């Protein structure tokens, strides 16, 4: 069984520690735990990991957030992975900081990365793990907020929250979407 786990974010040091790049941080943590190394190849940084007999392809698209669909589609095709074995990890303003919620389908929720993936794949039927970043910003300041760095309080909690997010990846690739949602949502 093969899985494509995509962490959404923006490439480059400028964005490395921003809220918008939490998807990158989660797949990096999973790769580190599995001793998988990212290499920069077509449309992104890719690492291949093993987990309980499964092949897990980890992708950090280099196409910038708003054009993530191109990279996701390319690796689904190249690796011959079915959309039901795709998990996209993204930041979410509608959830309080650190809250994790997995869904098997749904709207883009105003997230441009998800919007592009759905447009390119022509479906909303794929799993996504939403990582809450909160909404502590004034009207009109949304972009600055998601492209801003974590507060000191948030930074202290990040390691534990990211570790929990990697449990979702493990569950998705072994016990499946529904059981993972049941076991881990709202943890």
Image (cartoon, rainbow, N blue to C red):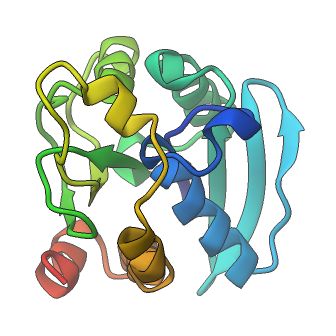
Q: Up-down: is 120 above or below 6?
A: above
Q: Residue 148 or 48: which is nearer the viewer?
A: 148
Q: Residue 128 or 11: which is nearer the viewer?
A: 11
Quick check: 23 left or right of 78? left
- The residue shown at (20%, 30%) is 124
Q: Up-down: is 41 above or below 118?
A: below
Residue 111 coordinates in the image, percent (x, y): 26, 28
- The residue shown at (28%, 42%) is 126
Residue 10 coordinates in the image, percent (x, y): 59, 32
Residue 64 coordinates in the image, percent (x, y): 58, 22
- The residue shown at (81%, 25%) is 42
Q: Residue 41 or 84: which is nearer the viewer?
A: 41
- The residue shown at (62%, 72%) is 29
Q: Up-down: is 76 above or below 141?
A: below
Quick check: 4 left or right of 160? right
Residue 124 in view (yes/no): yes
Q: Quadrant of the N terminus?
A: bottom right
Q: Up-down: is 122 above or below 46?
A: above
Residue 129 coordinates in the image, percent (x, y): 30, 57
């Amino acid at each position: 069984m093969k899985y494509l786990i995509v962490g959404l974010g923006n490439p480059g040091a400028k964005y490395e520690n921003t809220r918008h790049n939490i998807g990158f941080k989660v797949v990096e943590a999973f790769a580190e735990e599995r001793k998988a190394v990212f290499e920069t190849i077509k449309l992104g940084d890719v690492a291949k990991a093993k987990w309980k007999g499964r092949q897990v392809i980890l992708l950090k698209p280099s196409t910038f957030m708003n054009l993530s669909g191109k990279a996701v589609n390319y690796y689904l095709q190249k690796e011959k992975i079915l959309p039901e074995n795709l998990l996209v990890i993204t930041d979410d303003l509608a959830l309080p900081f650190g809250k994790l919620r997995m869904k098997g389908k749904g709207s883009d929720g105003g997230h441009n990365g998800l919007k592009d993936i759905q447009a390119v794949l022509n479906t909303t039927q794929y799993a996504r793990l939403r990582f809450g970043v909160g909404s502590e910003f004034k009207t009109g300041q949304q972009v600055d907020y998601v492209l801003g760095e974590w507060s000191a309080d948030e930074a202290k909690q990040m390691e534990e929250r990211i570790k929990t997010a990697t449990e979702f990846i493990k569950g998705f690739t072994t016990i499946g979407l529904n059981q993972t949602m049941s076991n881990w949502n709202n943890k």
